[in-house]
Image (cartoon, rainbow, N blue to C red):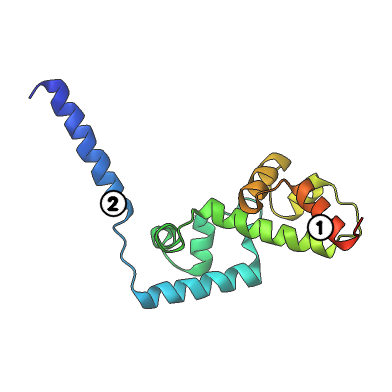
Amino acid sequence: MTKKNIFTRLREVLRQKKKSKAYAVQLTSEQIESMRHRLQELVTNKKPFLQKGYHIRDMADDLEMPMYQLSAFMNQILGISFSDYMNRHRIIYCEELILAELGTKKDLDDLAKNCGFNNRNSFTAAFKKFTGRKPFEYIKSKHSQVRPG
């Protein structure tokens, strides 16, 4: 085996080892149910998705669990990354705001900020990812449902 082949093989082995470490956390069914309940309670009561600069370490602290365990739970059990989880809840909240304020004119920048997004672009991208439509298209469709034209 040449030096080049040895280094290529070594890189591949290290890459595989790194991938397997990411899934090394084993959770019991009791831990999973407890974490699911505590996470839902936190999201419902504290609405961390509306807080600027809220990171996975903040959530782990709020839930009083190690960050690696929360990350493993989200990725392995829920099948979603922390940022997608937060954005999904922001979009759900945004949809509720839109429905509650159908009669008012809401600026998309204000709507994005009220839903915990830092800017309109990230808001629009997340909204489209989780609803399949851009925010203004969603708002327009909800207005037409209320006032058939």
Q: Position of residue 72 (x, y in %)?
A: 39, 59
Q: In the picture provided, is 119 more to the left or to the right than 63?
A: right
Q: Which residue is mark 2?
A: 21
Is residue 130 found left or right of 22 in the rendered image?
A: right
- Residue at image position (73%, 59%) is 95
Does 142 appear above or below 2?
below
Q: Quadrant of the C terminus?
A: bottom right
The part of the image, by quadrant, that contains residue 147 is bottom right
For this rendering, which residue is in front, 5 or 35? 5
What secondary structure is found at the residue carrying circle 1?
Answer: helix
Give the mark nearer the N terminus: 2 vs 1: 2
Residue at point 83% right, 65% down? 100
| Position of residue 86 measured from the top left corner of the image (x, y, whole percent) | 59, 56
Which residue type does callout 1 highlight?
Lys
Q: Are marks 2 and 1 in contact (CB under 8 Å)?
A: no
> In the shown orientation, is residue 139 left or right of residue 33?
right
Q: CA distance from mark 2 to mark 1?
A: 46 Å
User: Residue shown at 76%/54% (left/top)?
Assistant: 114
Residue type (three-letter) at the residue carrying disc 2: Lys
Residue 97 placed where, x, y %?
Answer: 78, 61
How would you rate the neighbour count of disc 1 (Cα within 10 Å): few for under 14, some for 14-19, many for 20 or more?
some
Location of residue 120 with respect to 41 vertically, above or below = above
> Hey, which quadrant is residue 120 in on the image?
top right
Q: Is residue 62 visible?
A: yes
The residue that disc 1 covers is: 142
Q: Nearer the viewer, residue 83 or 57?
A: 83
Looking at the picture, how far across and down is residue 1, in whole percent? 7, 25
